[in-house]
Image (cartoon, helix red, strand yellow):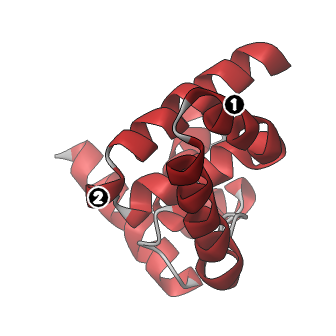
Amino acid sequence: MFCNNLIKGFQSLEKLFINRENLKKEKLNLWLYENKDRLTHTFLILISKINKKEAVDFIKQIQDYYFNIYQKQIREEPFLSGKEIIEIFNLKPSPLVGKLKDSLLKAQIKGKIKTKRQAVEYIKSLLDNSTT
């Protein structure tokens, strides 16, 4: 499992590297979140496969972003638990609650949701759109 995830992490890092001139923070945030346990490994593979100076410069930019922006601005725990979603929106426990929570977490990681109030509004909009 680790090796498969490492390969996927590297492949997505390589795409970020190739498109580094137009790199969107949302994509970088998701990549950092999904690969945080394999950062060193994926960085080493990138250095071994790509022009070393360019790869090292890119990795330094990612590290700088991670420590100075990502860690300070991105919350990796959902603002709302499944229980809170059930209570606030009068839902029954179901797979829908898990999907709502996952969607909320991805929106937070992308930097779109920064407060609990925004989280409630986000879930409300998802529910409103799913019933229309």
Q: Tell me the element at label 1.
A: helix
| Residue at 55% from the left image edge and 85% from the top image edge | 115
- Chain-order first, disc 2 or disc 1: 2
| Residue at 73% from the left image edge and 58% from the top image edge | 83
Q: Where is residue 80 in the image (x, y as percent from the top left)?
A: 65, 67
- Which sits in the foreground, 111 or 99? 111
- Which sits in the foreground, 42 or 106? 42
Answer above or below: position of 86 versus 115.
Answer: above
| Residue at 60% from the left image edge and 44% from the top image edge | 52
Answer above or below: position of 38 versus 129.
Answer: above
**Residue, disc 1:** 45
Q: Based on the displayed image, in which of its 4 quarters is residue 35 positioned?
A: top right
The amino acid beneath tag 2 is Glu
Q: Position of residue 91 (x, y in %)?
A: 55, 51
* Alpha carbon separation for disc pair 2 and 1: 21 Å
**Residue, disc 2:** 21
Q: In this view, does 9 lie to the left or right of 121?
A: right
Q: Where is residue 97 in the image (x, y as percent from the top left)?
A: 58, 44
- Which sits in the foreground, 13 or 102? 13
Q: Residues within 10 Å of mark 2 (few under 14, many from 20)?
A: few
| Residue at 45% from the left image edge and 80% from the top image edge | 118
Q: Position of residue 39 (x, y in %)?
A: 75, 46
Q: Tell me the element at label 2.
A: helix
Q: Residues within 10 Å of mark 1 (few under 14, many from 20)?
A: some
